[in-house]
Each structure stands twice: as structure tokens, then as C-alpha cells.
Image (tube, rainbow, N blue to C red):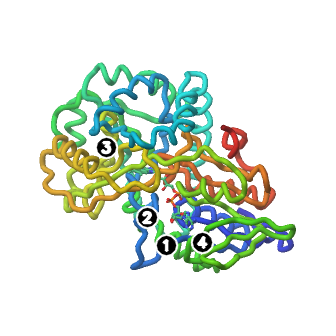
Amino acid sequence: MIPVPEAERLNVIVIGAGVVGLSSALWLQRAGHQVRVIDRGPPLPGQPYTHACSFGNACTVALGACLPVAMPGVIAGVPKMLIDRKSPLALFWRDLPKLMPWLMSFLRSSTPLEVDRIVRVLGQLLRLAEAGNAPLMEEAGSIRLLQRNGSLYLYKSEQSFQAATNDMLLREREGVRMEVLDASAIREREPNLAPIYQRGLVFSDAYHIDTPYQYMLDLAQLFLARGGEFIRGEASSISRQNDDVSVQVDGTHHKADRLVVAGGAWSKRLAATVGDSIRLDTERGYHVLFPDAGHLLSAPTCYPEHGFYMTPLSEGLRVAGTVELGGLGQPPRPVRTNTISQVAKMLIPGLSRHDREWLGFRPSMPDSLPVIGPSPRDRRIIYAFGHGHIGLTLGGVTGYIVSDLISNRTPPIELDSLRPNRF
Ligand SMILES: Cc1cc2nc3c(=O)[nH]c(=O)nc-3n(C[C@H](O)[C@H](O)[C@H](O)COP(=O)(O)OP(=O)(O)OC[C@H]3O[C@@H](n4cnc5c(N)ncnc54)[C@H](O)[C@@H]3O)c2cc1C
């Protein structure tokens, strides 16, 4: 990226040191801007970072993940979700009234016409994902963390595989490379799996990062080495003046020419202080870690029926996923992690006990598209959040687009579908 002329270099504050905020900060630095990042706990060695969704995800750069969560027919699964506490989809009953606007928009996004449009937009973003990630990974020294073995989707029956035909056609249309496996090819590729799968789908371009936390540490070190500064604390509000915008952090106002809100699932509150109402909520997700079990699989393996991935890492086998609608304030529910652990043991008989349990907050828009664009109230404030299930994958390209917007350059894609006030 060619830096902007000296006179156009700006003082920028980014709120949020997750993958989206850090990638934005680094692309902004590449364009020549002076950048500070605010976070309640930035990823620095020896300091807690488990609050960030970027800490505990399934580690997969899922370049073929162009399908939204709200696919046609999603409504058929809702009754099961409401009664079965062990279903991969769950919600807190008492939150239902609060969730209604989000759920209604979610259902409206699931019509075939809408899904077709959303898949095209996700496809465009995903085709640019590597151009956004690779330069940062290289410069941060994170190439050492990448494991390029693709990823695998499993289907228990021929029938469930056939039911996914339309999904495959949509992926094919977006240029996603896939290879179909039969039961014996699955066994050859992953001999430690219980032999209960009839079909598999390999996404050959996918890869995983061992671990995303280490990647965040690398990005943070690169940011500091390029002259960036972290401000540790809770950003409580954003205010706008004629000459600048400012963020209040623990009683102190920090001023900047431009502001990027990349606070993940917490961004809705910050946008509200600007006067913007955004249909962002959280899809809570969990992971459990089976230590010393990373050798049992060769690549991230997804069980769509159970809603999780198993990802082999040097720290162990991370089993991550499921969706729970229940906001940011409720405590973790042990029934979710117990279920993930039990199912994982059924799928990989060699597993013993898990140790770490983690709850994370996916920042999710009802249509599975992120928000990337200026606040309708003030173009000096750029929103970059709502990446749902694929933020690790789209962090880099989002940062690239944020940097283009702040540098008055034309972004590589049309941003209308990603505007903050689309609902
Ligand atoms: C179980 C699970 C599995 C997943 N698997 C994958 C996967 O395999 N591949 C993939 O691409 N994606 C995956 N994801 C999604 C991905 O992890 C997220 O989309 C991504 O991490 C979001 O990044 P972010 O930077 O927007 O938010 P975060 O990582 O949550 O970062 C936001 C940061 O902002 C800070 N912050 C927010 N508000 C404030 C405030 N007011 N003051 C100070 N600091 C603030 C927070 O402390 C946090 O550090 C998964 C998610 C989950 C839960």
C-alpha cells in the first residue's frame, strides 16, 4: 500500500484490539497514519486476553465460508432449539423479547433471494481475504503459525450430504474449491475418527492458525514496533466536535481526527453514544480444549449437525462452536461445554478429559454480513464489526477497507450491503 501524502496523514484512534481492530490499525499505519488502539485488555505477553472473541475461536481461515447462518428453511430448526438444551442452537428464554428485532431480521434474511445476494457479497469479501491477511501475517512473522491442510466437513448419511447440494452449488458459484470424500477416503485422511461418516467435503484452500491468540500477540508487537500506542481502559462514550472526535476512557478524553469502532460484540453500545442504532447482537460460542490430543486430527474438522469444529493445535485439540443467543451479560452454561465434550468423545474415541472451557461473544448481524462503513451521523467515525462466524478470516480485508475509507481511497468492493443502518 502506498502511503498517503504527508499532509493527508491523520491521527486515528481504533477502539478494540481484536483481529478486526488490530488489522485496521496495521493497515492504517501502512497508509502512513498515526494510530492508537483502545482496549480494556490488549493482547500483550502475560496479560489476560480471553475476553476477546479473537482469543478462542476455531482458528480456521475459512476462505470458503460464503454461506450465511440464516439459510432458507432455518425456521424449521427453531422449535428444536427452543426445547432441546443440547441442540447446537440455543437461546435464553427470558431474553426472547429483547432478541425479537434481531430474530425477525434474521428470518427475513433467510429468503432464497436474500441468501443469493448475501452469498455474492460474502464471496467477494472472501476472495479478497488473503490480500488483506497475508501482508500482515508476513510482516508480523506469523507465517510460522499457519497450518495448510485444508478443512473437512462431515456428513453422517448420504441423505444429509444430498441435502447440502444447494449449499455446494452456491459455494462453487463463488469459486470455492471442494473435494468430495467417501467413507473410506475419510478414514484414510482421519483414521482417529469414529467410522460413522458417509461423506466428507474438503475445503482445500482453508488453513488454520496455531493459535489465533499468538497471532494477536504478533500483530500487537508489530503495531507497537511501527510506533503505535495502546490505551488500556474501558471506552464509555464517543463525542463529536467541529475539529475532532473523542473517546472517553476511564474519565479521560482522547481526541483524534478519525475514529474506528472495532469493539466486536460490544460495538452496539459505543455506536449508541454516537446516536446510531445498529442491529448487532451476539451469537455466543464455546470451546473446550483436550490437551495433548492435537495429533488426533490433521485439519479442522466440522460437524455441521453438532455445530462445532475440532481443530488440531500444538496445545491440544480445540473443540469450538455452537450458537447460543443470550446477550453479553449471562454467565457461561456448563450444559453447553459438557455437551460439546461428550459429543467430541463420541466422534473421536481416543479423547480423554478436557481442561480449558471458554465462552466467547461473536459480534453478529442478522444477515451474517459485517458492518464496514462510516456512521450515518458523522463520516469521521468508521464502523468495523459484526463479522460473526468469520472474523478471523475477514479481519485483514476489513482493515484494508477501513484504511481506504480513512485515506479517501476507493475500497476494493462496493460497501452498500455493509452499511451500518441497513436494518
Ligand atoms: C466458538 C467460536 C468459533 C469461531 N471460529 C472461527 C473460525 O474458525 N474462523 C473465523 O474466521 N472466525 C471464527 N469465529 C469468529 C471470530 O472469532 C470473530 O468474528 C472475531 O474474533 C471478531 O473479532 P473482533 O475484533 O470484531 O472482536 P473481538 O475479538 O471480540 O475484539 C473486540 C475487542 O474490543 C474490546 N472492546 C470492546 N468494547 C470495548 C470498550 N468499550 N472499551 C475497551 N475495549 C473494548 C474487547 O475487549 C476486545 O478485545 C469464531 C467465534 C467463536 C465464538
| Residues at marks 1 and 2, CA–CA distance in whole angstroms | 8 Å
Which label's residue is closer to the chain start, 4 or 2? 4
Tell me the kind of residue under disc 2: His
Give the labeled residue for mark 1. Answer: 41
- Tell me the amino acid under the disc marked 3: Thr
For the residue with label 4, is its CB less than 8 Å from the closest atom of ligand 1? yes
Question: Which residue matches tag 3?
Answer: 301
As measured in the structure, the alpha-carbon distance from the residue carrying label 4 to the one carrying label 2 is 14 Å
Q: Which residue is mark 4?
A: 38
Disc with the residue nearer the chain's start (2 vs 3)? 2
Instruction: Tell me the residue at 54%/67% (across/down).
Output: 17
290 lies above or below 339: below
As displayed, is residue 309 above or below residue 295? Answer: above
Residues at discs 1 and 2 in contact (Cβ within 8 Å): yes
Whether pointer 4 and pointer 2 mark residues with C-beta atoms closer than 8 Å, the reply is no
Upstream in the sequence, badge 3 or badge 1? 1
Residue 270: percent from left, percent from top: 63, 59
The amino acid type of the residue labelled 4 equals Ile
Tell me, for residue 17, which label it has, or none: none
Any mark on residue 51, and which? 2
Upstream in sequence: badge 1 or badge 2: 1
Is residue 317 visible in the rendered image? The answer is yes
